[in-house]
Amino acid sequence: MLAGTGKDKNFQAQIKRAFTAFYSHPKTMLMVSVETGILRANLCRYVAEWQKQNRIRKVTTKDCKISKYRAGYYSTNPAIVKPKTNSHE
């Protein structure tokens, strides 16, 4: 895709919205999907990439407030996202 195209700008805006949604407090991907309208498949890709960059961290695993199933709660807040230690999560 060429840089500067309309699709590229929308893609960058979507990434920024997703990152901001995870910032306020830990949320599941489904919670962010419902909040932002971004497809969960896209969120999975963004979260995977941010994990490689240490920009997001799975804070806990508990029942999702939407699906009621166990899911990971993620955060992009630097106060929560700390480098991994040798201790278990």
Image: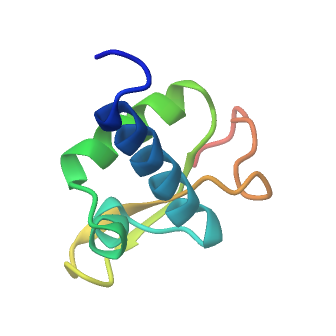
Dividing the picture into quadrants, the one containing residue 63 is: bottom left
**Which residue occupies 37% across, 66% down?**
32
**Which residue occupies 76% across, 51% down?**
78
Q: In what quadrant of the picture does the N terminus appear? A: top left
Looking at the image, residue 72 lies above or below residue 36: above
Asked if residue 14 lies left or right of residue 30, the reply is: right
Looking at the image, residue 50 lies above or below residue 1: below
Q: Nearer the viewer, residue 53 or 68?
A: 53
Looking at the image, residue 21 lies above or below residue 48: below
Asked if residue 69 lies left or right of residue 83, the reply is: left
**Which residue occupies 52% across, 34% down?**
50
Residue 13, percent from left and from top: 46, 48
Residue 77, percent from left and from top: 69, 57
Residue 37, percent from left and from top: 27, 66
Residue 31, percent from left and from top: 34, 72
Dividing the picture into quadrants, the one containing residue 30 is: bottom left
Asked if residue 70 lies left or right of residue 17, the reply is: left
